[in-house]
Amino acid sequence: MSLEMNFELPEAVALGAIGEPGNRVFVIQIRTTLDALTLKLEKAQVAGLVRYIAHILGDLDKLGHLPKASPVVPPLEPLFVVGEIAVAYSEPEDSVTLTLTELAEEEEAASKVTVRITKELAGTLAIQGTELIEAGRPTCPLCGFPIEPEGHPCPRTNGYRAPTP
């Protein structure tokens, strides 16, 4: 069953991660006075989203005061897994629109959530997402793969010695 939901300037939009680094589930949550909607994302999607938002906002003249970041709150059960993310800036409305489309099989109709937020809230989301990514496992300076607590068999060294910075 395909759903289409639109949120115009919701009370809060937050990025979060559930679990320990290396085993986290990333989510985006949209909250209104009546409801909270949670969607599951991949870490790479969060990283791409924050980079693109930063790129869009970097081209604008000036941002106002950035609101405080909102944490994700229960219920944390995702409605669906996000497959595609579209981000657009509307100059007449001076706002950013996020369109999050469900990851679905080709023959299935995909659900879609569209959220219009202020450019200031978009800036807060970019900061929040960057902090989430940086709070994860460190990456190897040689190969870019995450370094596990028990060690890292770096493919650049054939896994025989620890990477040196």
Image (cartoon, helix red, strand yellow):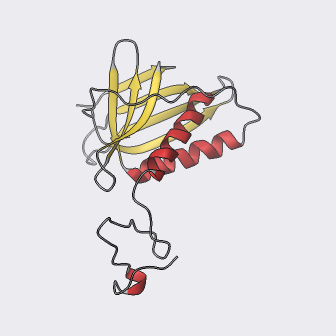
Can you name the residue that lies furthest to the top here?
33
In this rendering, position of residue 159 left or right of residue 163: left
Instruction: From this view, report whether residue 161 is shown above or below residue 99.
Output: below
Give the percent coordinates (x, y) of residue 10: 47, 19
Give the percent coordinates (x, y) of residue 54: 61, 44
Give the percent coordinates (x, y) of residue 115: 47, 27
Residue at left offset 46%, top offset 69%: 144
Indicate the quadrant where residue 64 lies: top right
In this rendering, position of residue 10 left or right of residue 74: right
Indicate the quadrant where residue 6 lies: top left
Instruction: From this view, report whether residue 129 is shown above or below residue 134.
Output: above
Give the percent coordinates (x, y) of residue 154: 38, 78
Count all numbered tags in the image, as a single digit: 0
In the picture, which quadrant includes the N terminus?
top left
Nearer to the camera, 98 or 30: 30
Indicate the quadrant where residue 147 lies: bottom left
